[in-house]
Image (spheres, grey):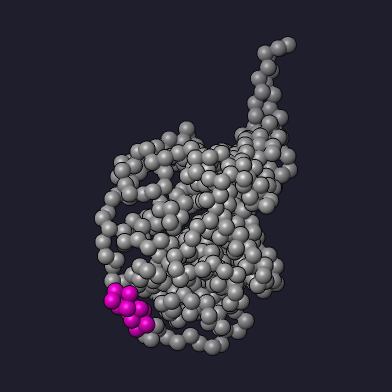
Amino acid sequence: MKRRTFVAASAALAASGAARGDNHGDKIRLGVIGCGRRGRNNLRSVLRLTDDIQVVALSEVFKPNLEETLKMVPDAKIYPDFRDLIADKDIDAVLIATPDHWHAYMSVEACKAGKDVYVEKPVSVTVHEGQMMVKAARKYDRVVQVGTQQRSGKHFAEAKDIVQSGRLGTISFVRTWNYSNLFPEGIGVPPDTDPPADLDWDMWLGPAPERPFNKNRFGVNPYQYAHFRWFWDYAGGMMTDWGIHLLDIVLWAMAEPGPRSISTYGGKYALTDNRETPDTIQATYEFPTFVCTYENRVANAFSGGQPGYGIQFHGTEGTMYVNRGYWEIAPEVRRYREPEPRVERRMEAARGESANHSTDDHWRDFIAAVRNRNRPVCDIEIGHKSTAMALLGNVSLRSRQRVDWDPVNETTENKEAQTYLRSDYREPWKLEL
Ligand SMILES: NC(=O)c1ccc[n+]([C@@H]2O[C@H](COP(=O)([O-])OP(=O)(O)OC[C@H]3O[C@@H](n4cnc5c(N)ncnc54)[C@H](O)[C@@H]3O)[C@@H](O)[C@H]2O)c1
């Protein structure tokens, strides 16, 4: 009954919304699937690029988010079921900004229907899903851009160039981190209840296991990013929520396809909420010429005077820190006592500021790729590799194994780890090319 109530309400909204006009010139006609916080953030960028792209349709299973988004694009057509949006031949491209557990299925189906895709990060919940997304993009010759928008940040590109120029010397260690403190209650322990009448819970769960509704599993709330992130069925905790953004820059700057081994430790040691993902994690990635770590604390925010998140490249000549606001180089200082005291500093300190709106430019890049049929700056293969690196951090943690990994063929001999590389979909959903 509840599902029917919601679908009927959405249909009524659709009827009251103005019908989509037919004259779009040569603008890319975009359908949006998932109108939550990030969906609307993306829309803000899209709405600044209206000469090239127009939002013509929305699909959303939670009525308050649909209504909020309709205020931004009142003429958009509404599809309560995203499969109808994907089947609409008047739509050229889709934005997929649902929780992570939907990304792979929706992307593959959109490719099959001839749509280009802008899909939010992380691209998937398992490595296998990401592989299927790459195959679908290639098989159906679609442009698939991943929402790791830092790749369109000009100062991130500068930071990458600095690493590749050799200016920092030999880089043997890269550190990435996020710290915060939500102790003790975190997101709380709400009881399981019936789903709200304005949510289609079954369609929110989709390929994920059937579960009673819990406010935190759904997680949409006015104050914070939705809490689905902290449940294994839908996402991968901070490792894949934020870790991917940082590790993506590491793979880019160090020009690596992925690590050759991964060892992760962590657990839920301090928070008393009902999240499943750890509040403390340390992932160590081994590469042929350097070690990279991702460190996350959710119950202690001490950062030793540094910002609470970032990426640090440690080279023999200097160390570069980079975050979304700037990059900064601290030279190595060598002090000698003999034969006489002297201090050697072989490079100058330097700093560069963020100089563009990375999400706007990520969309510009997507639009150009759709028009020119080029690979976008964060093509699905790149987004998949970065997602896989983050996912593998969780695979090591959950399997309690050091995972030896072939980053090119994306395989491991480790049997315990293999069980975490793919998961079964709930009927009737099937991930097929
Ligand atoms: N690139 C970035 O910097 C960035 C920032 C934040 C979030 N994200 C990513 O964006 C995605 C969404 O995150 P969010 O915080 O906006 O979550 P959210 O829960 O606020 O929004 C997701 C929306 O998708 C809807 N949805 C779920 N199933 C659906 C279905 N079958 N059909 C249509 N709509 C459906 C939900 O009801 C919800 O409104 C996540 O994958 C997240 O990792 C990226």
Along the line of sight, the residue nearer the viewer: 382 or 77: 382
Report x, y in % for residue 38: 46, 62
Residue at (65%, 29%) from the top-left corner?
A: 332
Q: Does the magenta stretch include residue 5?
A: yes
Residue sitting at x 37%, y 82%? 11
376 lies above or below 394: below
Location of residue 15 by image quarter: bottom left
Write down the quadrant of residue 71 in the picture. Answer: bottom left
Percent x, y for residue 410? 64, 51
Please determine whether, in this image, residue 179 is positioned above or below residue 110: above
The residue range painted magenta reads: 1-13
- Decide whether the magenta segment is chiefly helix, strand or loop: helix
The image quadrant where one finds the N terminus is bottom left
Q: Nearer the viewer, residue 411 or 9?
A: 411
Q: For the view shown, which residue lies furthest in the top direction? A: 339
Examine the rendered structure and indicate whether residue 25 appears above or below residue 6: below
Residue at point 38% right, 41% down?
268
- In the image, residue 141 sits, relative to residue 208, either above or below, namely below
Q: Which of 359 and 184 is in front in this view?
A: 184
Image coordinates of residue 393 in percent, x first then y, are 53, 45
Hey, which residue is sitting farthest front in the picture? Answer: 415
Residue beneath the point at 56% across and 87% down: 23
Q: Position of residue 229 (x, y in %)?
A: 42, 54
Asked if residue 54 is among those painted magenta in the image, a careful observer would answer: no
Is residue 25 among what the camera can see? yes
